Image: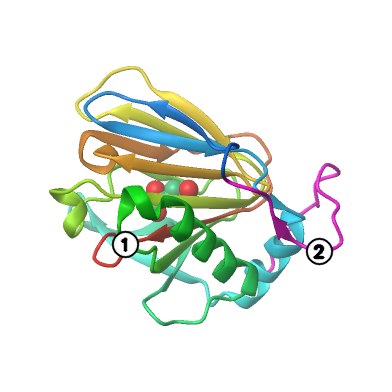
Amino acid sequence: MEVAHQPSMLDLAERASLGPLTGQVRRHQLSQGAWVDHLPGWVHGSDLLLDTLLHKVPWRAERREMYEREVDVPRLLCWYGEGDQLPDPLLEEARERLTAHYAPELGEPFVTAGMCLYRSGRDSVAWHGDTNGRSSRFDTMVAIVSFGTARPLLLRPRGGGSSLRFPLGHGDLIVMGGSCQRTWEHAVPKTAKPVGPRVSVQFRPVGVS
Ligand SMILES: O=C(O)CCC(=O)C(=O)O
């Protein structure tokens, strides 16, 4: 995948590694039983991993129906299901560490890894909740680790209200939990600014997408 990318001067580790979660993740309580945990810079040396993700992931372009027309989905995608080997061992470690940290609340492991590549500011995802499967009726968690240029993830209550903004890139972690997928929506808007690529890795329990 040829996407121009300039490494961050703030993240020049020689090897990618994960920082601690306990005592570092900050929880934001939202309304209606939703919450968001946030930890900037969880992955140290995240730009090394960005390169691997850009080159090793078999990115796919998708099309979808909109207003009776087929249009390009404005980002590239890849899905790693249960048992699929992830493109870098650090991602396997991240999934294990998240499973261990959230086990008392989640009660099941993070299993799948959805990946999105935002090639430039023209790529985006519109307001939505991850409500396919069990998350349409039950509380769950979606943990997102971001690589590359920070792009804002916006969150707002379903049905309207003011939004929260989390700039996510360079190894940042966000976990959407509780009723967040049912009662809140999230989006990554387009930007006219000249931005580099961002890869989002979303870990979910089985049956949630
Ligand atoms: O880019 C992100 O981190 C959000 C991705 C997302 O909302 C999704 O794929 O459902």
Q: Quadrant of residue 179?
A: top left
Which segment is the magenta one? 1-21
Which of these two is toward me, 66 or 30? 30
Q: Which residue is mark 2?
A: 15
In the rendered image, residue 209 lying in the magenta stretch gets the answer no
Which of these two is toward me, 4 or 208? 208
Left or right: residue 140 versus residue 54 is left
Which of these two is toward me, 181 or 56? 181
The answer, for residue 1, to whether it is visible in the render is no
Which residue occupies the extreme front position in the image?
104
Q: Amino acid at mark 1?
A: Glu
Q: Quadrant of residue 163?
A: top left
At numbered mark 1, what does the secondary structure look like: helix, strand or loop?
Answer: loop
Q: Which residue is mark 1?
A: 108
Neighbour class for label 1 at 10 Å: few (<14), some, many (≥20)? some
Left or right: residue 129 versus residue 26 is left
**Which quadrant, please, contains the N terminus?**
bottom right
Q: Amino acid at mark 2?
A: Arg
